[in-house]
Image: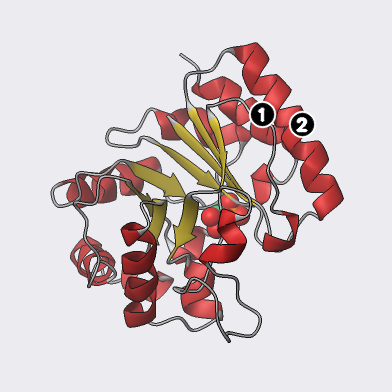
């Protein structure tokens, strides 16, 4: 399994440091073989001393080594901490911050060329889900425009927009059907994201074609995230 924590705009430098130390001892003691990814806010990036099962990544970065892109970070700032994992195309970047598919694809190309592990997010809004599964798949596939889905360091996270941060999880049947259809095109590991928590993570791990979860809200508490790593252990 792949268990990923997206802090979004939560945690400070200090609390992230404490979180990572606790997570690291937990994963080390558990002897987990699963992959654990943590995406802290960029102010909290650092070179953490971690078990090789855990990687830290960035939630976003500009497709440039450095330059004049006020408010953004680029490769130079990421490489300072020897990080090589990035989240691209998260629904909040697309729908709240207005990133277009062309911009998302540009970031993808840039960080792919640098060999990053890319967690690439796709997911339909509520009105598309209400039109039925065909529209859902068409919408999700349109978010693959300009994306090399055969890239070897790719993980795709399916996160229905209507289930993110809302407490509304897609039903297991909806997740299974959608992942099954996505899998026909995408060979990379597929994660599910959207209101995943300790109480529902086990059944989500068991869904066919689901190779892990991308967790927002429920990952911000380290004990809750550790529990989800523990549940993944077979
Ligand atoms: P959530 O967020 O777990 O709070 O729904 C998931 C995500 O945005 O990755």
99 on left or right of 37:
left
The response on whether ligand 1 sits within 8 Å of label 2 is no
Mark 1 Cβ and ligand 1 under 8 Å apart: no
Find numbered disc 1 in the image and state the secondary structure of the residue it sits on: helix
**Quadrant of the rendered image containing residue 58:** bottom right
Placement of 20 over or under 93, stated as above or below: above
Residue 167 can be seen, yes or no: no
Q: How crowded is mark 1: few (under 14 residues within 10 Å), some or many (20 or more)?
A: many
Query: Considering only order in the chain, which callout, 1 or 2, is on the residue closer to the N terminus?
Result: 2
Which image quarter is the N terminus in?
Answer: top left
| Number of numbered discs overlaid on the protein picture | 2
- Give percent across and percent down for residue 187: 19, 44
The 10 Å Cα crowd at callout 2, few under 14, some 14 to 19, many 20 or more, is some
Q: In which quarter of the image is residue 230?
A: top right
Which residue lies at the image location 72% right of the left edge and 21% below the top edge?
A: 25
- Circle 2 residue: 21
Q: How far across and down, in percent of the image, does residue 213 sit? A: 47, 41
In the image, is 10 to the left or to the right of 5?
A: right
- Tell me if label 2 and label 1 are in contact, CB under 8 Å: no
Q: Quadrant of residue 19?
A: top right
Residue 26: % across, % down: 69, 21
Residue found 19% across the figure and 51% down from its top? 150
| Residue situated in front as seen by the camera: 145 or 167 | 145
Residue that badge 1 annotates: 226
Q: Which element carries disc 2, helix, strand or loop?
A: helix
Q: Which residue is drawn at 67% across and 13% down?
A: 29
Image region (quadrant) for ligand 1: bottom right
Q: Is residue 19 above or below residue 101?
A: above
Label 2, label 1: how many angstroms apart (C-alpha)? 12 Å
Residue 134 seen in render: yes
């Amino acid at each position: 399994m792949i268990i990923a924590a997206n802090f979004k705009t939560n945690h400070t430098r200090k609390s992230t440091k404490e979180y990572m130390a606790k997570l690291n001892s937990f994963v080390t003691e558990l002897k987990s073989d699963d992959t654990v990814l943590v995406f802290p806010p960029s102010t909290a990036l650092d070179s953490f001393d971690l078990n090789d099962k855990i990687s830290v990544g960035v939630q976003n970065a500009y497709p440039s080594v450095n330059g004049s892109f006020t408010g953004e970070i680029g490769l130079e700032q990421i490489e300072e901490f020897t990080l090589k994992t990035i989240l691209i195309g998260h629904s909040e970047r697309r729908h709240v911050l207005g990133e277009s598919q062309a911009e998302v694809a540009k970031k993808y190309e840039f960080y792919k060329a640098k060999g990053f592990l890319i967690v690439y997010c796709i997911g339909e809004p509520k009105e598309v889900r209400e039109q039925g599964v065909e529209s859902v798949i068409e919408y999700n596939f349109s978010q693959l425009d300009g994306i090399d889905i055969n890239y070897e360091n790719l993980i795709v996270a399916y996160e229905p927009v209507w289930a993110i941060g809302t407490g509304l999880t897609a039903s297991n049947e909806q997740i299974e059907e959608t992942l099954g259809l996505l899998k026909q095109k995408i060979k990379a590991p597929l994660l599910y994201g959207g209101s995943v928590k300790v109480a529902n993570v086990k059944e989500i791990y068991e869904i066919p074609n689901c190779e892990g979860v991308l967790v927002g809200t429920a990952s911000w508490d380290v004990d809750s995230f550790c529990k989800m790593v523990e549940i993944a252990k077979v």
